[in-house]
Image: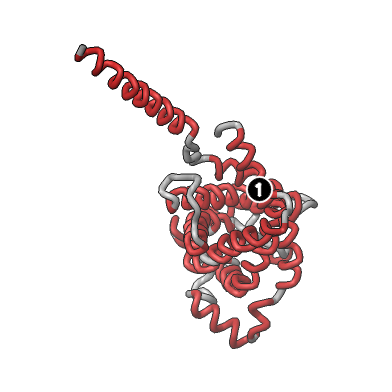
Amino acid sequence: MTVDVIQPQLQPQGQDQHQHMLQTQTAEQTQEKPARFRGFIGGITSGVTKLCVGHPFGATPPLIGWMFMDSIMLGTLHNCRLFLKGDDPTAQLTLFQHALAGIGAGIAVSCIATPARLQVQYDATTKTYTGPIDCAQKLIRNNGVFGLWKGMGATLIHRSWFSVLWSSYELYSSYLRKTGLSEPVINGLAGGMAANTFWLCAYPFDVVKNRIMTQPDVKPLQYPSWIKCFKHLYITEGVYGFYRGFMPCLLRSFPTNAAAIAVWEATMRSLKAIGY
């Protein structure tokens, strides 16, 4: 009699526990896992797009290097976002956290971008180096291995403005999603507007960086520090000197980055859909 009373009470409990275990296992299986390399792969497609749109008439070796820099930058951005989300891809970040992720991406790509100056020479009549290998050899001979990273501080200052790029991208994306536009269109428009916002803030620092990194490799240096270069540029050329060439940069920036970011986001969605 006792067994007959206890057995019906135990059976539902056992069934409930079994159902709970099945639900837990199903939830664990369907929970999205962080994909560490997704951003790096997407960054390659972004870099290729940027080359095709921004430099349609051919890509020199330094410009090809930008493709790999995009992979580093966007891959690091993706992983910084995951870190700030606590490895939960479904978590939402604040604008400040998006800015922090942008700074992390800027620091990472600066380590690659600084020696990647090997070397852009736009004036054939004043060419100092016959190519990237020759440039590297001469810089190391004159300054040691760390000579490849001269201008690192200026590069870090310039690329710290990626905080503005990626926080404004999130801000524009949030606003555009209220309009009912498709996600690819939102990615492109937000990417173009964020890039222009970035250049409005960062362009003077890019001018200073370029002056430092392309100065003749002779002693004493014309610009021994970022501050001295900034002061010299202001004294000799005024505020206008910091925005020389700004309009062509701004006009090219929107379509180039709109396409590149839209392709990156599309690649990220595709990789996620196939479970990578």
- The colour scheme is secondary structure
Q: Quadrant of residue 246?
A: bottom right
Residue sticking out furthest to the left: 2
Residue sticking out furthest to the right: 57
| Image point (54%, 83%), residue name | 231
Q: Quadrant of residue 167?
A: bottom right
Q: Quadrant of the C terminus?
A: top right
Taking the image as shown, residue 254 lies to the left or right of residue 147, namely right
Residue nearest the viewer, comparing 170 with 178: 178
Residue nearest the viewer, comparing 34 with 64: 34
| Image point (50%, 53%), residue name | 92
Residue 142 visible in the shown view: no
In the displayed structure, 56 sits above or below 227; it is above
Q: Position of residue 237 (x, y in %)?
A: 65, 85
| Image point (55%, 56%), residue name | 113
Taking the image as shown, residue 179 lies to the left or right of residue 109, namely right
| Image point (62%, 86%), residue name | 236
Name the element at disc 1: helix
In the displayed structure, 246 sits above or below 3; it is below
Count the numbered circles shown.
1
**Tag 1 residue:** 46
Residue nearest the viewer, comparing 80 with 223: 80
Residues packed near mark 1 inside 10 Å, few (<14), some (14 to 19) or many (20 plus): many
The amino acid type found where label 1 is placed reads: Ser
Q: Position of residue 1 (x, y in %)?
A: 21, 11
Q: Position of residue 11 (x, y in %)?
A: 32, 19
Residue 245 visible in the shown view: yes
Q: Position of residue 19 (x, y in %)?
A: 40, 25
